[in-house]
Amino acid sequence: METLAATGAEETSVEEREHPPGSQPPKDGRWYASRIALGLLVAGLIIWSFFEPKIRSTVITVVVAVGASGALWVGANLLFNQVRNRWALFNATAYAILGFLLGVVLHGNLITIGSGEGFLTWIVGPLVGAAAFGGIGYVLSTTDDPQQRRLIAVGSSAVIGVVVGLLIREQYHPEFDALAIALYTAGGIAIGAAISALRKRPWFEGALTVGALGWLLGAWGGADLGGGNVATSIIAALVPCLMLGVRIGMTHNPDYQGRVEIDRKSRAVIFIGPALLFIAISLIVPAVRTLYLSFLDNDSEGWVWFEQYGAIFTNETSFDASNWTNTFTSWPFIIGVVLLIIAAVVGVSMRNRTGRAVELGNPTMAPLVVGGLLVCFGVFTAFRGTIVNNLWWVVTVVFLSTALGLAVAVLADQKGGEKIAKSVIFMPMAISLVGASVIWRFMYTARDTSAEQTGVLNALWVGLGNLSTGSGIPTIIVTACLGLVLIGLFVMLARALTRRQWGRSVLPGVLIILGGWFFIRYTGLIGGGVGGHTVNEDGTTEAQTI
C-alpha cells in the first residue's frame, strides 16, 4: 500500500511538473487547424472585398459600426472617469454633447438657416451648439448658489430658445393648434409627475421635463408647418427651453459622495446602453410608430381613431368566427382539456405534498403546458382569418423558441464552440421577426443574369460559378486556399489514425471526401465547375441563378 501511494504521489508530481496548475495546456493540432482556418477565412474575405464592391461596402459598414460602438463605449467610460475629481470638465463635456446632438438634429435635417450642402455647412450648427451648451455647463459647475444657478439656467435657456426660433427656416414655422398644445403639454405634465411620484421625487421635477417634451410635440408635431411666422417659431422653441431651464436651475452640484454614486451607477448604463439603444431603434420605435399609424387613414393624414380596429373584426378575411362551435369537437381541444384535468388533479396532489401545485420539474408542468397548447390549437382550427393566423404564429413560435432555446443551452453548455453557437442562435433575436423575414426574402432574390445580383445567396452562387470557370487571380487564390484546407484535413486524419484515435478520424475523413469532391469539381478535373453557371453548346459559360 505504501509503495502504491508513493508511486501515485510520484506520478502526480511528474504531471504537475510537466503542467503546473495555472499553466496553459499544450496546443494540439486542432488548435492550430482552427486558427489556420480562421486566418484563411479572414484573408479570403479581405481579398474578396477588393474584387466585389458589395462585399467591400458591407465590410466597411461592419467595421465602421463596430468601431463607432467601441468608440462610444470607450468615450463614455472616459467621460465618466472625470466625475469624481473633475466635475467641471465632466459637466461642460456632458452639456457640450447635448448641444452637439441638438445641432445635429436641427442642422442635419436642414431645419435651421445656414444648413445645406457640404461638410462645413453641416458641421457648423453642431459645433455652435456644443460650444454654447458646454459654456453653460461649465458656468453651472462653478457655483452652488441657488439664485445664481436659476439665473444662469433660465437666462441661457431663454437665449437659446429665442436663437433657435429665429434660425428656423420659413417652411417650418408652426401654425399653432391650441387644443393639440394643451393636450400634449397636459399629458406630458401628468406623465412626468407620475414618474417622479414613482421615483419618490418632487412631482414638479418630472412635470417640467416631460411637460417640455409635450409642448414640443404639440407645438411642432400637431401644427401645420409653414403656416406660422417667426413669432410662433420663437414661442414654440422658447417655452420648452424655459421649462427645462427652470428644471436645471433647481439642481445643485453634488458633493464627492454624490459624484461617487453617479460614477458607480453610470457603469451599468454604459454597459447596457448600446444594447437598449439598438433594441429601441429596431423594435420599440417601429412598434410605437405602427401603433400611431393605426389611428390614421389609409393616406396617413386624417385621424380615424379606432375605426380600423373595428373593421378588422367585421371583415371575414381578418376574423371569421362562424364555425366557432367546431372548437368543442376538435381532437386537439378534447385531448387538451383531458390533459388540463389531469394537470389539475396532479396539482392538487402536489400541493398537499409539497405546498406548491406547479413549479419547474413538477409532474404538473408537462400536462399543463401540453394541454394548454392543444386547447389553443383546437380553438385556432375552428376560427379563420389573419388574426387567428397571427395567434398561431405567436403561440407556436414562443413555445418552440423557448423549448429550442433551453435545449440548445443544455446541449451547448461547456462544449467546444459554445460561444459561437449561442451567438449564431441569439443574434437574430435583436431584430423583429417581420424584419428578419423581409431580410431573408431579399437574400433569396434572383435578378436577370445580365444585371448584378442583389440577393446574397444568388450573388454568392453566381460568384462561385464565375470563380470556378475563371482563370484570374481570385480563382487562383481560392484554389490555393482550398488546397491548403485539404492538406490540413489530411494531416489531422493522419495524426488521428497513427494515434489509433478512431473517433477523431471520422470528421476529417468525411470532410476530406466532401471537400475533395468540391475541389475536383471546382478545378474542373471532373465536371464543368461548381456554382451558378451553365455551359453553352459552343463551350462558353454564362451565369445562372436559382
Image (cartoon, rainbow, N blue to C red):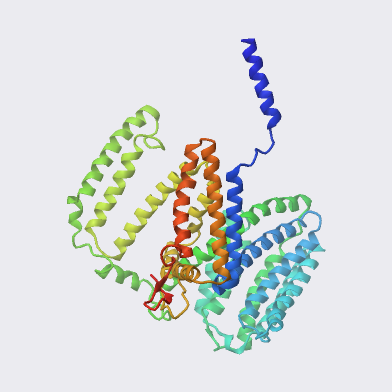
Judged from this view, the residue extending furthest toward the top is 1
Name the one closer to the observer, 68 or 453. 453
Q: Position of residue 180 (x, y in %)?
A: 50, 77
Q: Is residue 323 above or below residue 466?
A: above
Name the one closer to the observer, 411 or 46. 46
Quadrant of the drawing holding the N terminus: top right
Q: Residue at x 62, y 63 (%)?
A: 66
Q: Residue at x 19, y 63 (%)?
A: 322
Q: Quadrant of residue 74?
A: bottom right
Residue 422 located left or right of residue 47: left
Q: Is residue 272 above or below residue 545?
A: above
Does residue 58 appear in the picture of this structure?
no
Q: Residue at x 63, y 54 (%)?
A: 271
Q: Position of residue 206 (x, y in %)?
A: 61, 62
Q: Quadrant of residue 390?
A: bottom left
Q: Position of residue 260 (x, y in %)?
A: 74, 50
